[in-house]
Image: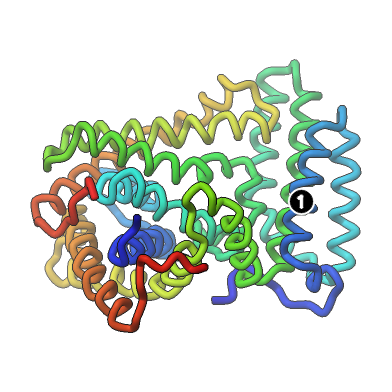
Amino acid sequence: MLSTRDLVLCALFAALLAGLGMAPPIPLGFLPVPITAQSLGVMLAGALLGAKRGGLAVLLFVLLVAAGLPLLAGGRGGVGVLMGPTGGFVLAFPVGAFVTGLLAERFATGANPLRLFGTCVVGGVAVVYAGGIPWLSLVAGLPLEKAALGSLAFVPGDLVKAGVAAVAAAAVRRAGVLPAVHA
Amino acid sequence: MLGLYLHRDSAVHRWPAGVKMGGLLAVTAGVMTLPGAWGAALAGALGLGLLAAARLPVGRVLRELRAPVVLLTLLFGFQALLAGTGWAEAAVAVARFAALVLLATLVTLTTRVADMIDLFERVFGLLRPLGVNPAKLALMLALTIRFIPLLAEQVREVRMAQRARGVERSIAALFVPLLVKIFTMADDLAAALEARGYDPADNGR
């Protein structure tokens, strides 16, 4: 059962995702393009809250987007965005956070950034693309391999985000503020 | 929070959220099963009819549709130019989803966020036998809406602190204090909820 603190944490992380979408893109020293951090929030939710609470936090965010709040980066929202070409990626966000959390609970319980990076790449990048690419292929009438090829352009940026999420998650775990992941 | 809802005095606005979302699901299923472009044509006509009936400003609706339309056009262009074959099927797929995205956008623009959230709660209530607690979900959704300005403010604060220290390009300097703050805030907020009589064991029946 979810404790009061769990409810609050899920809501706070869902709000963090929204806040990251509203914040101006963050410039990183080594990247020419500033990153929008929403998918970063997905990985952080999974890595720090675990499968159940992380997935739930991101699900709350997606539900509010579906309800018509303009919370996606660029002020977009509504059912139309979810049914559009990039909707599959957003719909896969909660699953991505869940899988990130599941892997983190098994293989990256400590503050090792490399292990956390691995979980973020699988949950936050691979799973999200596995949802987004078939959807894009269906909506745009593209063969699956072409939809995959077109999405490849975003992989380097997402790998950087996984790295950022891993480093940040490791530092937060070292800070010792985390509740037990195996609650 | 107002969301994308756009108020007009129309019958479409007054239809219950459940009718609109149910209708959208039914039309989606219909469009995907009807052969060829028939479904897309019917759904497109329905969309245009509803657009007129809802008395929404066309410019505003077009603005909502711009991003997906640009992306679909680009994808379709590449497909037609590079592949040469299969573009007829691609045209049907694009037409189908263009019509569906128009209908979905109309649902969003004519339905209040609060009504939509009520609908989600009722739908999740059906999952109660699976251990889903709609009252908790409703509370979390309400809390999230309340926390969004709070978190946006926190993001701004931390970034300002970074700038003051000249570390605005450090990743750790943004996310670590932000996340640590979230975890400590959670303790206080949970205590505040329980101090006001919230009982997590109450299943909301």
Q: Quadrant of residue B94?
A: top right
Using the image as rendered, state which of residue B96 and residue B168 is in the foreground.
B96
Residue occupying the point 53% across, 44% down: A91
Regarding residue A34, the answer to whether it shows in the image is no
Residue A104 or residue B93, whichever sits in front: A104
Numbered disc total: 1
Quarter of the image where the N terminus of chain A is located: bottom left
Q: Disc 1 on helix, strand or loop?
A: helix
Answer left or right for A153 relative to B3: left
Amino acid under label 1? Leu
What residue is shown with label 1? B24
Residue shown at the point (74%, 27%) measured from the top left: B90
Nearer to us in this view, B204 or B144: B204
Q: Residue furthest bottom?
A: B196
| Residue at x 62% of width, y 56% of height | B123
Q: Is residue A115 left or right of residue B122?
A: left
Residue A133 showing in the rendered view: yes
Question: In the rendering, at what x and y percent does residue A43 appear?
Answer: 33, 45
Q: Residue at x 76, y 23 (%)?
A: B87
Quadrant of residue B4 within the rendered picture: bottom right
User: x and y percent of residue B131 in the render?
Assistant: 47, 51
On screen, residue B7 above or below A150: below
Q: Position of residue B127 (x, y in %)?
A: 56, 51
Question: Is residue A173 found left or right of A37 in the rendered image?
Answer: left
